Amino acid sequence: MTDTGIVSERQVDAGIAEAGGLTLGGRRLAFLDRARIYACGVTPYDVTHLGHAATFVWVDALARTLRLIGVEAEICRNVTDVDDVLDEAAHRAGEPYDSFAAVQQYYFDRDMAALNTRAVQHEPRARRYVDQVIRLSSGLLAADAAYVRQGSVYFRGEPAVRRSGLDRGRALRLSAEYGGRPDDAAKDDPLDVAVWQAGEPGHPAWESPWGPGRPGWHAECAAMALSIFGTGVDVHAGGADLRFPHHAYHAAMAEAFTGVRPYARAWLHAGTVRVAGAKMAKSAGNLVLVRDLVNGHPAAAVRLMILDRPWGKDWDYSAALLETADKRLEDLYQAAGRTRTNPAAVPEIGRLLATDLSVAAAVDVGIEEGGAAARAVTAALGLS
Ligand SMILES: [Zn+2]
């Protein structure tokens, strides 16, 4: 950023910040004193990789920015410990799914703490919300948004797909990729998804009015979000790959149950982290683990590497990128030692962060203006 002067557009944004609001995805959000943020959390079946971590570091940056403008963020980050992928991983490890998940959860918490991500206020575990999923299922049946077949309760998915703007072919492909079982012959429509899945061997099961079974993935999150925050949230966050089907179905179930629309005032879909153009995935053998990164570099540099870009854009991790973040962090620390600061620079940092979390621009101002401005951006983003 070369122009650090205050221009009229920024003065407008300053007004928003002072009024307790921020822009997210180009949308202006007003807050009084509290913001409800639901972040789709991890399925604790594997170690934390950079792709997971990036989402939660962005949620943390959002919460810190809200605090900067006088709004207390209340974050709910769930743990999906009832999940078919988790069941398979636990089975391979020869452990019960719940104790297997608890160990993986410990590693996740350790990695998040290493990245200076603050503890969240609510951390519901899916297996403690089975009763709420049963109630959600009953409510969706009463609203005629779902139907019962062979011990499962299926949610009618077509309206959610229509609202997502995806064509049917792509929706079906994504549904298959994310465990939606479009080939399940019991459904009226392949795009319908299980709110309640009838019991199957190799999976945990609970009693329900429709027989033994387990919650569906989207229904778990919908039940946890509604149980903790009521009818909706201010911001729903998660990785970009959760946009469909997970978030589309979650929102549709919540809205069908409560009758309140929209379920979320805004969405924060953190860009996908790739390696040499490929999405990070265990199956691709290209996982970059948080633990390895923080062993060789300051955790603040890893954090800055994640945040030093537009939050919604996909990006490629490389060792060179981390070196750049190392250097930029060092520049910021050195700038913080200067004694003189342009008095306009400190509020400018707040304005930039409250304007779609413009971290890169705020860091630029910190490095260029130095002194209190550099210290302000370091503190605001948890980079010390
Ligand atoms: Zn979720």
Image (cartoon, rainbow, N blue to C red):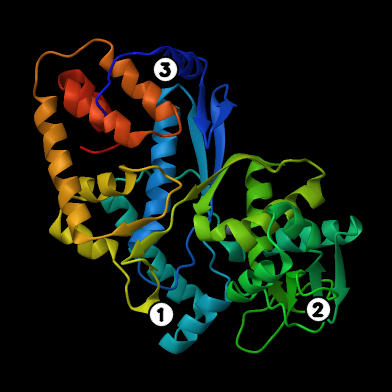
Marks 1/3: CA–CA distance: 45 Å
Q: Earlier in the sequence, mark 3 or mark 2?
A: 3
Residue at image mark 1: 283
Which residue is located at x 41 percent, y 50 percent?
56
User: Dot 2, how many residues are within 10 Å of its Cα: few (below 14), some (14-19), or many (20+)?
Assistant: some
Point 84% across, 56% down: residue: 139
In the rendered image, which residue does mark 3 sit on?
A: 10
- Residue at image location 24% in from the left, 10% down from the top: 343
The residue indicated by pointer 2 is 211
| Residue 369 in picture, x, y percent from top left | 18, 20
What's the residue type where badge 1 is placed? Ser
Where's the C terminus, which quadrant? Answer: top left
**Residue 112 drawn above or below residue 19:** below
Q: Nearer the viewer, mark 1 or mark 3?
A: 3
Q: Are marks 1 and 2 in contact (CB under 8 Å)?
A: no
Query: Where does residue 325 sit, x and y in percent of width and height?
Result: 20, 46
Residue at 34 percent of width and 43 percent of height: 309
> What is the three-letter code of the residue carrying label 3?
Arg
Q: Secondary structure at mark 2?
A: loop
Is residue 11 at all visible to an observer of this figure?
yes
Label 1 neighbourhood size at 10 Å, few (<14), some (14-19), many (20+)?
A: few
User: Element at badge 1?
Assistant: helix
Q: Position of residue 362 (x, y in %)?
A: 30, 29
Name the spot of residue 282 as percent of width and height, x first: 38, 76
> Where, by quadrant of the figure, is residue 356 drawn?
top left
Element class at badge 3: helix
Q: Is residue 165 left or right of residue 178?
A: right
| Precedes in sequence: disc 1 or disc 2 | 2
Q: CA distance from mark 3 to mark 2?
A: 58 Å
17 left or right, relative to 116: right
